[in-house]
Image (cartoon, grey):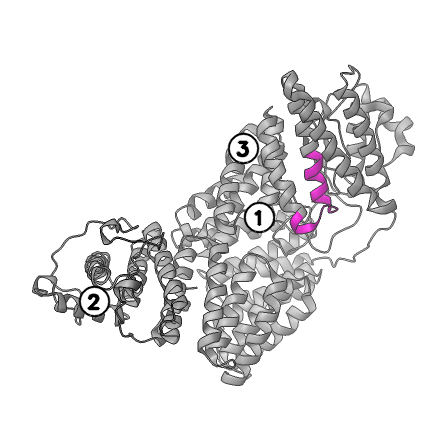
Amino acid sequence: MRRLRAASSLLSLFSKPKLSSQNTLPFLHSLPSTSRSDLKPPITFPKCPRLFQTLSQSTPPLESLKSQDKLLLAFKSLDSSSKVDSFSSNELVKALDLTIRALEIFERDEGGSISVAKALRLLGLISCKLKKFGDSLESLNTAVVILDRLEKEGFNDSEIRAVSLMVYLQLVETNSEMGRKWDTLTSLKRVFQLRKSIFDPNSPEMGAAYKDLCEAYAVVLDFKEALPLILKALEIFEVNYGCDSVEVARVRQLLSVIYVGLDENDKALEQIEFAKGIFTCLELEDDLLNLLVEEANIKISMGGFSEAIEILKSVIQRVGKESKIRAFVFVSMAKALCSQEKFGEAKRCLEIACGVLDKFESVDSSKVFDTYAEISMIYEIMNEFETALSLMERTLAMVSKSPREQHLEGSISARMGWLLLLTGRAERAIPYLERGEQRLKDSFGEMHFGLGFVSKHLGQAYMEVGRPAHAVQVLATAYNILSRWFGPKHEDSIDACQSLANAYATKASSSSIDTKQGHYASAMEFQQRVITAWESCGPNATDELREAHRLFEQLKKKALGSPSAVYPANALPLSQCRLTLPKQTPVMVGSGTGESGADRGGSMRPRSAIRNSSRGGVRVWLGTFNTAEEAARAYDRAAYTMRGPAAILNFPEEVNSVYSNSSSSSSSPREKMSVRKQEEKEVIEIECLDERVLEELLEYGEKGGT
């Protein structure tokens, strides 16, 4: 996003027309005003030193500014200069002081003029550089209000558009520095419209506009919106720069990312082949090596381990021992090994990767942060929960120092909270889930699907610790978000709806007589929605539908005061552990069931869990197993222990020979999700990794390449 600011260099200074007294426009949030005495700047300007020796070679010392004309001349020089980006902190403070003084003059003499908007834009830029993000946003948003008003009043349209572009470009930068991805996208949409009104449709500037907007959509994981934008950028760049240019190669690289996000891996590999050829011809070694690692990751996600290993071997031989790329190679290798359940070898690769990354821990690098997070999730897949949590905690400490990375801070916090909840530590999970919820809300807005999953897990944690009122609030949010993104018939939407029904019922049981029936009515409403959703899923959801009906009947009895009613009860789980080997296991802030984000490497070991009726219907951890069948049987044993012959099982034919015997001696386990029976299994043939190949790769890694 930093390069977006370069577009402002295309714009020159503009004349500063004064408005008549009838059109005076103070730079206020509420524009209408009838008296100059009522004017109060909405921005609280910092008190800065009034003396300095030299701001820059083109700006005279402040003490020599004996007249207003000289001060405005100094401001004009500063406004037209591109040196602000290179100013030191002290120089920025001095520049801020000069800009504030110029702004006071413009506002006094011209009201809400373009000169005021320009000064506010510069004030927003300097404030952002000084990390005063609130002041920056307030200045820039005020400039937007002024420019919108001027445009409506018929002032120079082209000049206003040009200044508006500069203002919105700075809004993009400020929001990006704050880690506010959704607001960055919103500002970039306006930048795109302004560029369309200024530049030729097939100009390089418009190609950059399409690419920038595509990247913003990709950041919020909206790949469908991103795809047509990047295809248009590719078309424009090929015309302007040539098919073999570095600009086109980087657009193709971004296009491959979009295709991966859309699960079109073959198309992604095609784009990588094109980009590889260009990088090779232009001898851009680092770009080529990073691209090769991306290619290997896609191959791994498709089950092509042998091809991926050959690619990674070629990379490791071309990088130095201290190169970050070396760490990325070993993380990719660990994913390949983990997918084949060769956990010992995978751990060796991760240890090498961490050894390299440790040297870059103090570097503010998104790629380094992302890689640490990825390593922690690989440990999680290997059932090394404590190691995963430790690495996440360490990564969290790093990213929390960078406001720009608050989306990653939110994702890691949410992941830690989910793991703690999964392993029965709900009290510890809640602060992490609350932190994750807030950071993701700040970054992606209040309706992003990632926030829906975090809110669902937070609600389940609240239920676990006996806080149903809090659970109702966040689970209602979760259900609304997930239903909006995926529809009310999606598994995760149904699960959130079931949890919400449970929360209302639990809240009713502890409510006063005046509110009890209202809460039961809400519980029955959402339980009915669960029934309706499962009915729409057809014969594949027969067991879930039967269980939903049973719960509804229990809920009605509970509302009527029946002492024999059991609600919430252990509803059927989602299919986290499947009787198939998945081609790809998406993992970010979700629970490993495709809830959000994407770990593009390999499959996850089957996990099993169940709802515990004695603890408010929350789902708790049973374990991780070598096969899906083992996970399914673990669920069956726990279900039979809880509910006896009324339990709905994966293997009911085994009930007499196995579960009845084990139930008499088993204590109530801590469990969490299970497997749904599937009539048809998708079989994916996985290549085995040759031990000799691993040894060769590790040997290259220990030598640091050639």
Q: Which of 337 and 568 is in front in this view?
A: 568
Image height check: is 508 above or below 693? Answer: above
Q: What residue type is labelled 3?
A: Ile
Residue that appears at 60% across and 74% down: 231
Residue 235 image position (x, y, % from top left)? 57, 79
Q: Which mark is residue 75?
A: 2
Q: Give the range drawn in magenta.
A: 484-499
Q: Residue 430 carries which label?
A: 3
Image height check: is 551 above or below 132? Answer: above
Residue 143 image position (x, y, % from top left)? 35, 60
Instruction: Report whether 41 appears left or right of 425.
Output: left
Quarter holding the N terminus is bottom left
Q: Which amino acid does label 2 sit on?
A: Phe
**What element does badge 1 sit on?**
loop
Q: Which of 613 and 145 is in front in this view?
A: 145
Image height check: is 177 above or below 293? Answer: above
Does the residue at mark 2 contact the one at mark 3 (Cβ under 8 Å)? no
Judge depth for marks 1 and 3 and give the one in front.
Answer: 1
Q: In which quarter of the image is residue 307?
A: bottom right
Residue that badge 1 annotates: 447
Gap between marks 1 and 3 measured at Cα: 21 Å
Q: Which mark is residue 70?
A: none
Magenta stretch, main secondary structure, is helix
Gap between marks 2 and 3 measured at Cα: 51 Å
Residue 129 image position (x, y, % from top left)? 31, 57
Residue that appears at 29% across and 74% down: 14
Gap between marks 2 and 1 measured at Cα: 42 Å
Q: Which amino acid does label 1 sit on?
A: Met
